[in-house]
Amino acid sequence: MATMSEKPGNVFGAKLSRRQFVKTGGALVVGFGLVGPQFLKGDTAKPATFKNSLDPTLPSSWIEIHPDNTVLIRTGKSDFGQGSTFTAYRQIVAEELSVPFEAITTVVAGDTDRTPDGSGAFDFLGRGTPNIRKAAAYTYQAVLDLASEKLGVPKDKLSVKDGIVSGGGKSVSYGDLVKGQQLKLTIPVKGDLTSIFGLTIEGNPPMKPVSEYTVIGKSFKNSIISSKVAAKETWATDVRLPGMLHARVVHPKTLGSTLVSAGAVDKTRFPNSQVIVKGNLVGVVAPAEWEAIQAAEQVAGNTKWTEWKGLPGNAKLYQHLREEADWTTAPVSKGDANKGDAGPALASAHKKLSATYQLSYMKHAPIGPTMAVADVKPDGTVHIYTHNQNPQALRGEIAVMLGTTPDHVIVHSYPGPGHYGRSNGGNAGAEDEAVLLSQAVGKPVRSGCAPTICSGPHNRRLLSPMFSWPSMKKAR
């Protein structure tokens, strides 16, 4: 029979401990044994504070089981309409915990100060599944340990259905197992929180075999769709902060252009507008959005940029890539599945076939307009409100841009327009601009695009050399 006391118990490499007894409430929470990369610690000569990150001592992480038999789950993966975050992940956790789908009542996704693992809105059911599934599998084993102690029945003699553990003619619900106590399950993780793939749960807890599935494979409604259609969700475009200014950024027509001179705003027409210039960034801010749009269009007409003709145009793109492009500056990399050397193998082939294929250029880019709200506080803390594919990675990149540490940056995730493609692990086209403008004016700034001033490519090197993804440099 398993015994769990004040001292941590081993659960397939995870550690289960009773933190304290409480008169009411209680919960079993699933924390982690490692938090983030080295640079999250800021000054390495000082102890880590983990400000604005989930601390493993706090009652919040991947999974929480509450006394009323409800379950809360958290994931760093933002919802982009795929249904995985709010439906598939609920099914996966419900399956591994042997609880009804409806027991997973709350899904927290994307917010960097409320989710544990990072990673992006991609590969949900590949690299994404093991994290949430392993967390649930660890939790299930911990629940069995608690039930074994409570019922006085060996763990291997217990069975679970719909969140009720039975054995030896007795039964107990998950809620009753956690009631009146704060339980902490610490699971092992590795990785870099603000990298493109975030943290990964380690270990191999037993998982439910497919033959025993009762939840996965069934059809469930995506819980966020109805609230979106009914306009009950707060979208990124709905965010408004006290004292917030609206902004529009003037972009050049060509990708590599640099600023020669920024146009001045006509104060007789737009008395409340202000032009902000920082490096190659030209932005116009105003209390009213329509004034910001009109003023930015007027400023764009008088703003001068250098010409840049580094790209050959669509008609000559294929020829340029084959005959003129410099391929020596990009290091050659091989995938993990690649074996051997293709050159000698082809040279020794008895029969050779030769063919040339030409495909049209397809851009991995947003479909909808881009916007974000940024609020740079006097103490250097930065809040970003956006619809972004990889909030934790964005957090790290904004920190590098500002020359600070990621614990100063908090990204709040909201629904946004449909997208095929995003700057994976990076900005959505507005976050960096909103942050710089907010820093300049000392107020929250909502930055977006007006059609006539954003028709050109979004210059990702606004403050050269601000961005060079995936390697970013501090903005000058």
Image (cartoon, grey):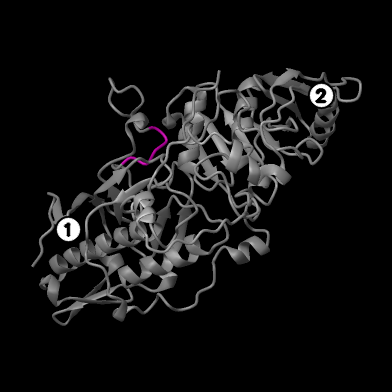
Residue 11 is labelled as 1
Above or below, comparing residue 411 to residue 164 in the picture = above
Rendering coords of residue 207 (x, y %): 26, 68
**Residue drawn where x is 70% and y is 26% of the image:** 257
Element under disc 2: loop
Is residue 265 shown in magenta?
A: no
Which image quadrant is residue 194 in? top left
The Cα atoms of the two marked residues, 1 and 2, are separated by 62 Å
Residue 272 is labelled as 2
In this view, the residue in front, 319 or 7, is: 319
Task: Classify mark 1: residues with Cα within 10 Å, few (<14), some (14-19) or many (20+).
Answer: many
Element under disc 1: strand
Q: Main secondary structure of the magenta part?
A: loop
The magenta region covers 51-55
Rendering coords of residue 222 (x, y %): 54, 68
- Identify the image quadrant of the C terminus: top right
In this view, the residue in front, 218 or 328, is: 328
**Residue drawn where x is 75% and y is 33% of the image:** 253
Residue type at mark 1? Val
Query: In the rendered picture of this protein, how many numbered marks are placed on residues?
Result: 2
Task: Classify mark 2: residues with Cα within 10 Å, few (<14), some (14-19) or many (20+).
Answer: some
**Residue 2 shows in the view:** yes
- Identify the image quadrant of the N terminus: bottom left
Q: Is residue 450 left or right of residue 80?
A: right
